[in-house]
Image: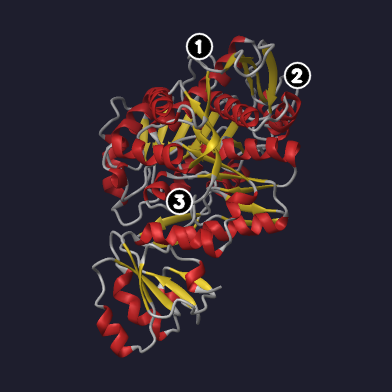
Amino acid sequence: MKLKEIINKKWITKGDLSVEVSGLSYDSRTIKIGDLFIALKGVIMDSHDYIEDALNKGASAVIAQTGRVNYDYYVDKYPGAVFVEASDTKEALAYVSDSFYRHPSEQMDVIGITGTNGKTTTSYITRSVMTKAKGMTGLIGTISYVSGDTCIDAPRTTPEAPDFQSLLRKMVDDGCKAVVTEVSSHALAQKRADYTRFSTAVFTNLTRDHLDYHQDMENYYLAKKRLFSELLVDGGSAVINIDDEYGVRLVSELEESRGKDIRVITYAIKNSAADLIAESIDFSYTGTRFKIRLSDKLSPKSGFVEMESRLVGYANVYNALCAAAIGLANNISIDNIKGGIVMTEMVKGRFECVDLGQDFLAVVDYAHTEDALEGLLKTAHQLLDSYHYAGKVGRLAKMRKDRFSLPSVKGRGKIITVFGCGGNRDKGKRPKMGELAAKLSDFVIITSDNPRGEDPKKILKDIEKGIKGDNYIVIPDRAVAISLAVELASSGDIVLVAGKGHEEYQEIQGSRFSFSDKTTLETAIKRTITRPAFGGGTNYMGSEAARC
């Protein structure tokens, strides 16, 4: 493909624009002969400093930011060098990526989901709904990138523009009719998804996170808003949670700025003004049932639709409700929406039950924000309360004699929580999460998450500052912390391991070490919990939670 075919004609150019471009690169270390090198200025590194390295490796042309390059120097040293000057090379990278991969988002439905919590699970449910109704549907998100029979682990939620557009092109070529993609606030701020034509934009919620990058909630919100105000196509749909105050604000601002251009569909559990409202919610260890009340705007008959999901917890009602709204926005029938929701199985690292026959519930969850941790703990309380008051919690008589037992609350099981906070990230949420965990758990084990470049002990002390009681212990070694939680658990308890979810590593001082919460939890259970001999009692955890 020739350079002149993929650049913006408004950009300033120097050299022969008919030069062939065989690939795109924003990292001089990955340059191949014939690549177009796009120089980006980052927070730490500035790839304008590596233009010469890129040319030495065979770059066919360079896009640089206005005012950052002495072109005469390069032209003298590299006769025939071709340069393009753009005012914003992050935007330029998105532009040439879309052009180079032949505008893939024009050839299928692209659903973008943004928000602090719930993006991943909602994307899986939505993909299930879209697949049932429209056929093969791609997925780009925190856990994996999926197209056809290809599934690869995701290095980041929303990849850089060339990788993002390359994935979209592969999905089109594989025959995907639609793609569901998580769109992070970082990606929106850095314009990684720019020039993608989103037919549906989705807002799940906005709570404190990533303030180390965005500085404050206003900047965080404005980054999310770009998906709706700038990237959603005319005629597209915005699906918004109006139980969230930022969701209410977003609806108001969109009605004012794009009221005639887009369709807005709202969902909620508490806000009666929503187009879809979840009611009659029933939790169990095996899944969730609820009803959706549809407004006249969505259905001439309005009324209620009964829903069933294999996913557990209050947060998953929001996730399923959101997926239903997305389905309606894409003109999918209620039957296909119901079928897609009930087909969705447990998502890796999202209230993922680990059952090896033990007599307590063990859960791995990605909750790493205050709001997500609160939702996780409240779900645990709801499950314990429902089974306790229904008289279904049977305490096993045979217990390990050497196991320390925490006092039970009102005769029901206990909640034992293991969690930590990541290093080099928003420090303000640490004491708040500590306070919340101690308040809503019977016992808390504070441990390391991904300390990154920070001293783990400093992070743990920050968490401790928010804890008012004494129902906790600090164990920096995450494997030891998880093992202790299992050792403390008695029949009918819930052990929550929060923060890392699906991650298969722990990042310490710039290096990633192999570590899995799920594997560590399984090992601890195998080592310390013996399968009980069932008599007349009922091991509700071993029977029903096994199907969670």
Q: How many marks?
A: 3
Depth check: 46 or 8 in front? 8
Q: Where's residue 204, x and y in %?
A: 49, 31
Depth check: 538 or 42 in front? 42
Depth check: 294 or 526 in front? 294
Asked if residue 101 lies left or right of residue 187, the reply is right
Residue type, numbered disc 1: Ser
In the displayed structure, 128 sits above or below 405; it is below
- Secondary structure at numbered mark 1: loop
Residue corresponding to mark 2 = 536
Question: What is the distance, in whole Å, between disc 3 and disc 1 at their CAs?
Answer: 34 Å
Neighbor class of circle 3 (other Cα within 10 Å; few <14, some 14-19, many 20+) is: many
Q: Where's residue 22, x and y in %?
A: 54, 75
- Of the 4 image quadrants, the one containing the C terminus is top right
Residue type, numbered disc 2: Gly
Q: Give the mark nearer the N terminus: 2 vs 1.
A: 1
| Mark number displayed over residue 299 | none
Q: Give the mark nearer the N terminus: 3 vs 1.
A: 3
The residue drawn where x is 41% and y is 47% is 188
Q: Give the mark nearer the N terminus: 2 vs 3.
A: 3
Q: Where's residue 318, x and y in %?
A: 55, 26
Residue corresponding to mark 3 = 194
Residue corresponding to mark 1 = 272
Depth check: 14 or 370 in front? 14
Q: Where's residue 520, x and y in %?
A: 55, 48
Neighbor class of circle 2 (other Cα within 10 Å; few <14, some 14-19, many 20+) is: few
Question: What is the distance, in whole Å, between disc 2 and disc 3 at their CAs?
Answer: 62 Å
